[in-house]
């Protein structure tokens, strides 16, 4: 079965990596779909986020692509039967539950699977990591090495 794990992943952090690796252990193929989020100011362009994710995670059943359009339409084009969503806390569930119900209404044949983030990653968010990196804080324990290097380079130029 093909599963899609959508997100902006700006930047990819160890909580994302954990969900991706665990999903790869469950599903035949996991497609990480990197979408633009109009409500967020992207630090890295989509092409860079795809490259960083491919470099950070090496699994034979993992594909990393740029996503576009409505998620359920995108999933159908891939032949995916599952949408994966990571959950950190109750607030995530409330937000994700609304989207899961709407996706189910539009695509009854596609299931949403919620994967709980491991406890040691529950506090991570891309927003927090960007803020810390912007202050030149060491985020190398929070993100994969290629992402840490890209963040250092990005903020060195600022």
Image (cartoon, rainbow, N blue to C red):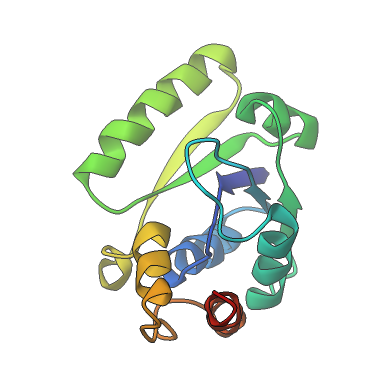
Looking at the image, residue 65 lies above or below residue 25: above
Compare residues 120 and 7 and report the one nearer the observer.
7
Compare residues 145 and 16 and report the one nearer the observer.
145
**Corner quadrant of residue 118:** bottom left
Query: Which residue, as the protein is rendered here, is positioned at the far front?
Result: 158
Q: Please count the marks in the image.
A: 0
Query: Which residue, as the protein is rendered here, is positioned at the far right?
Result: 77
Q: Is residue 46 left or right of residue 150?
A: right
Residue ID at (30%, 42%): 92
Residue 137: horizontal and vertical position, in percent? 36, 83
Q: Is residue 120 left or right of residue 53?
A: left
Residue 134: horizontal and vertical position, in percent? 42, 72
If the image is split into quadrants, where does the C terminus sit?
A: bottom right
Residue 44: horizontal and vertical position, in percent? 62, 61
Residue ID at (51%, 68%): 17
Query: Which residue, as the protein is rendered here, is positioned at the far top?
Result: 105
Residue ID at (59%, 75%): 154
């Amino acid at each position: 079965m093909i599963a899609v794990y959508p997100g902006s992943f700006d930047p990819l952090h160890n909580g994302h990596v954990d969900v991706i690796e665990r999903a790869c252990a469950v599903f035949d193929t996991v497609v990480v779909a990197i979408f633009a989020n109009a409500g967020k100011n992207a630090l890295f362009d989509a092409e860079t986020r795809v490259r960083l994710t491919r470099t950070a995670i090496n699994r034979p059943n993992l594909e990393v692509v740029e996503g576009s359009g409505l998620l359920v339409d995108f999933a159908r084009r891939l032949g995916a039967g599952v949408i994966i969503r990571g959950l950190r806390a109750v607030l995530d569930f409330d937000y994700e539950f609304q989207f899961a119900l709407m996706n189910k209404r539009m695509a009854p044949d596609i299931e949403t699977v919620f994967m709980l983030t491991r406890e040691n990653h529950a506090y991570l968010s891309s927003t927090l990591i960007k803020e810390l990196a912007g202050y030149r804080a060491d985020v190398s324990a929070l993100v994969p090495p290629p992402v840490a290097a890209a963040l250092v380079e990005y903020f060195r130029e600022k």
